[in-house]
Image (cartoon, grey):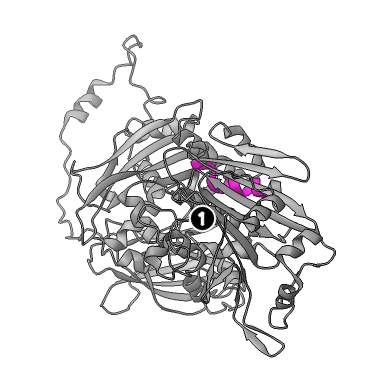
């Protein structure tokens, strides 16, 4: 489970996952209003000193045939490369050290003894109890030592752990967890302020004196991944918001070279340099700098309000407007300004009163289409599967220290990489309009930009005034007309009387189809979406073929549309489909889909891999529950 849990496309690197989880835990353990300080140190321990911590009788367990570690240390002649992580300004691991009761054991119990269980409360960045598995995963020996100093007793408590597999040595079967500890009636208890704790501090160059906090020692690290530049890059990408906000200070130390680096609230330019070649990060930190008032040029503040003036629960974007005109907002974006929208939102759980708050949406003009960046309580949420790109803009969506952030936290997976309303912790709150809560936040940047485009699309009846002006007051008189012609123009014109047929007004479609830069977007049309139970869309797609019917000639080797819609991507062809929560797949095959759309806010994005071929699409719609005749079609 350790090897697989963090194999996520957004946090796949070892050092990235380690930084993300350990810093998050330290921030959640903050003791007061001062910033949390964390020190990451690299060093090497000679093999003869390392043998104290990994004696020969222990080494045999790592060599058991069931373990199968790919890069075991050379115990006798290899220096032990290690990483230490010490936090300051935190509470340490409080709680009884000699109990298996989660209540009296407190943080000490939940760190060392619990798996998949956390005692973190609401408002914390993480609360699943599984993030700590990344610590031994960073070790080639799947091992770590943890030493904590607590404010309650001013003592140091040390235990270590190696997490392997069930294995057999000399006919004796062993369970996966190995402990570096004392034993009290079969229960592992820590070494406490003795010569062992002093030796750990000396061997691994730990710096804590008597301040409360937690220190981690990870021996036998993967040296090619855990380096100072890679750690600095991961720190900058993941935690630039709390660093710049003054809530976090991180120091990096290499005991071998003497190199040091520090990130604090004055490190705006230093954080940029840590990922100088990452264009996405550069855009993100610029918007974050604007949010925190660090940019020299002030942003343009725009309030978002409901058209009705009310402030109740409402997740329908069509009922919202901006307090600044779309022309002014567009002008600001075109002149390189960052626009900061404040969006009101009401959260209504079933078991408590409604709470109101707001979240922030910051947008800058940038050619192309770009995924927004989502931040919850200063933690980046990197892999929202159903997010869509914003056209010609880069956006940052930020929710922090509010009921909004708490609801989003409950909707996260254990690795805190996405939001889904199907998560148990989210569903147990029974939020009002729960299925629209997350899309309201997730799609906010696209909806705000859509409002600007809608305003721009209104007809301008003075558009030709500049090139077809009215006659100037000093203009020369026009030549007079012939008198007979003038008289004829005055005579009333007779037109034959005709009966106009009673033609009913056309009903708009419930959907729109549009194309942009390698993507095709199928979305709802509020004017035509009049059925409360929604519609069934019948969709076919195929690459165009000269002189042949593309749908009959479509091959599963071109792409599998049903597979792409179900899993997000057809891995064989690379064809991708992204959809929001208002879309449900009913059935489909290689080139066709039947979809139930329940809201005019539905959106489906098709991203073909082969951009050198034209993609033909046909769409038909039927009111949900009626016959499936495809009564209207369009091609793109």
Q: Residue at x 38, y 64 (%)?
A: 104
Q: Which of 220 and 24 is in front in this view?
A: 220
Report the label total: 1
**Label 1 belongs to which residue?**
382
129 vs 74, left or right, is: left
Which residue shows up at 24% across the image and 52% down it?
314
Position of residue 331 relative to residue 320, above or below, is above
User: Is residue 366 among what the camera can see?
Assistant: no
**What's drawn in magenta, residue-wise?**
230-242
Q: Is residue 239 magenta?
A: yes
Left or right of 198, for residue 425: left
Q: Which residue is drawn at 44% across and 53% down?
A: 125
Which residue is drawn at the image coordinates 59% and 72% (left, top)? 547
How many C-alpha atoms fall within 10 Å of the one at disc 1: few (<14), some, or many (≥20)? Answer: some
**Residue 467 at x, y = what percent?**
42, 25
The image quarter containing residue 635 is bottom left
- Which quadrant would residue 3 be assigned to in this image? bottom right
* Element type where label 1 sits in the image: loop
- In this view, the residue in front, 101 or 477, is 101
């Amino acid at each position: 489970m350790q090897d697989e849990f963090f194999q996520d496309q957004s946090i796949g690197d070892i050092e990235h996952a380690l930084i993300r989880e350990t810093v998050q835990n330290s921030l959640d353990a903050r003791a007061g209003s001062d910033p949390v300080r964390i020190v990451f140190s690299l060093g090497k321990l000679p093999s003869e000193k390392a043998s104290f911590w990994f004696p020969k009788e222990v080494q045999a367990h790592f060599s058991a045939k069931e373990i199968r570690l790919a890069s075991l240390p050379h115990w006798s002649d290899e220096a032990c490369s290690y990483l230490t992580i010490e936090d300051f300004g935190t509470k340490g691991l409080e709680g009884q050290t000699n109990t298996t009761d989660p209540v009296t054991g407190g943080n000490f119990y939940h760190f060392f003894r619990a798996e998949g269980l956390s005692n973190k409360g609401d408002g914390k960045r993480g609360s699943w109890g599984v993030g700590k598995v990344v610590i031994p995963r960073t070790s080639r020996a799947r091992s770590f030592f943890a030493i904590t100093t607590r404010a309650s007793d001013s003592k140091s408590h040390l235990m270590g752990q190696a997490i392997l597999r069930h294995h057999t040595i000399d006919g004796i079967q062993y369970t996966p967890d190995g402990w570096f500890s004392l034993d009290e009636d079969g229960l592992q208890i820590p070494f406490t302020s003795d010569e062992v704790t002093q030796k750990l501090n000396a061997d691994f160059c730990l710096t804590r004196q008597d301040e409360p906090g937690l220190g981690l020692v990870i021996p036998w690290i993967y040296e090619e991944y855990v380096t100072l530049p890679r750690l600095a890059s991961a720190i900058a990408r993941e935690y630039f918001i709390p660093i710049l906000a003054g809530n976090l200070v991180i120091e990096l130390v290499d005991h071998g070279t003497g190199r040091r680096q520090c990130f604090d609230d004055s490190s705006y330019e230093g954080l940029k340099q840590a990922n100088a070649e990452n264009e996405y990060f550069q855009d993100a930190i610029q918007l974050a700098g604007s949010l925190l008032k660090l940019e020299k040029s002030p942003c343009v503040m725009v309030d978002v309000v409901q058209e009705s003036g009310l402030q109740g629960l409402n997740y329908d974007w069509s009922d919202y407007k901006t307090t600044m005109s779309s022309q002014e907002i567009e002008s600001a974006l075109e002149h390189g300004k960052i626009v900061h929208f404040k969006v009101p939102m009401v959260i209504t759980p079933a078991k408590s009163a409604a709470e109101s708050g707001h979240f922030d949406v910051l947008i800058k003009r940038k050619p192309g289409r770009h995924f927004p960046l989502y931040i919850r309580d200063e933690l980046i949420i990197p892999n929202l599967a159903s997010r869509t790109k914003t056209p010609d803009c880069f956006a940052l969506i930020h929710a922090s220290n509010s009921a909004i952030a708490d609801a989003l936290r409950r909707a996260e997976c254990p690795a805190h990489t996405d939001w889904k309303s199907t998560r148990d912790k989210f569903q147990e709150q029974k939020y009002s309009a729960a299925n629209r809560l997350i899309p309201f936040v997730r799609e906010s940047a696209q909806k705000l930009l859509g409002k600007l485009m809608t305003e721009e699309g209104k007809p301008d009846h003075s558009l030709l005034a500049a090139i077809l002006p009215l006659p100037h007051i000093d203009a020369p008189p026009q030549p007079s007309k012939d008198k007979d012609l003038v008289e004829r123009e005055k005579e009333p014109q007779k037109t034959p009387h005709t009966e106009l047929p009673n033609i009913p007004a056309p009903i708009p479609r419930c959907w729109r189809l549009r194309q942009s830069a390698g993507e095709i977007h199928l979305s709802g049309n509020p004017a035509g979406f009049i059925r409360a139970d929604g519609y069934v869309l019948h969709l076919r797609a195929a690459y165009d073929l000269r002189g042949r019917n593309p749908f009959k000639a479509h091959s599963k080797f071109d792409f599998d549309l049903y597979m792409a819609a179900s899993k997000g991507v057809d891995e064989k062809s690379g064809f991708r489909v992204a959809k929001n929560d208002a879309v449900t797949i009913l059935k489909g095959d290689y080139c066709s889909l039947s979809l139930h759309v329940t809201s005019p806010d539905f959106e489906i994005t098709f991203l073909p891999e082969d951009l050198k071929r034209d993609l033909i699409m046909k769409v038909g719609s039927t009111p949900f529950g009626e016959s499936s005749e495809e009564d209207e079609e369009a091609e793109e």
